[in-house]
Image (spheres, rainbow, N blue to C red):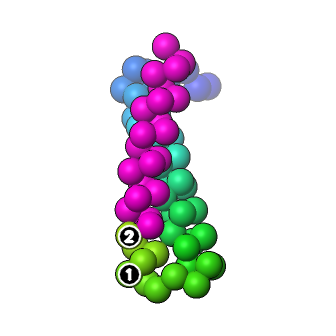
Amino acid sequence: MVGPMSDEERHAGSQRLYAGFVLLVGASAGLMALSGGATLLQAMIVLLGGLAIGVCLLWYLLRMSR
């Protein structure tokens, strides 16, 4: 039988979820740039920008949930 999650497990799961969210936003931006005809360098720059936007969006969402 499975018991309740410990605080460490809950924290680790939350961190993985946050990282996945940021990666999803960044990868989405990069793939959209590639599908729009961007070069590989341009797509990498957009991907980095998307990651930064993902971090900002995550910060905003976490702040609003408190």
Q: Secondary structure at mark 2?
A: helix
Q: Quadrant of residue 8?
A: top left
**x, y percentage for residue 24?**
54, 55
Name the residue at the top extreme: 66
Residue 19 visible here: no
Residue displayed at 42% across by 54% down:
51
State the quadrant of the N terminus. Answer: top right
Judging depth in this view, the residue of 28 and 20 nearest the camera is 28
1 and 2 marks in contact (CB < 8 Å) = yes
Q: Which of the labelled discs sits on residue 26, or is there none?
A: none
Rendered location of residue 29, percent (x, y): 54, 63
Q: Identify whether 56 is placed above or below 49.
A: above
Q: Which residue is mark 2?
A: 45
What stretch of residues is rendered in magenta?
Answer: 46-66
Q: Residues within 10 Å of mark 2 (few under 14, many from 20)?
A: some
Which of the two residues, 51 or 12, is positioned nearer the viewer here?
51
Q: Which residue is mark 1?
A: 41
Q: CA distance from mark 1 to mark 2?
A: 6 Å
Element carrying mark 1: helix
Residue 62 part of the magenta segment: yes
Query: Residue at coordinates 45% horizontally, 22% vertically from top-left?
Result: 63
Which amino acid, mark 1?
Leu
Crowding at dot 1, Cα within 10 Å, few <14 / some 14-19 / many 20+, comes out as few
The answer to whether residue 35 is magenta is: no
Residue depicted at x 45% and y 48%: 53
Amino acid at the residue labelled 2: Ile
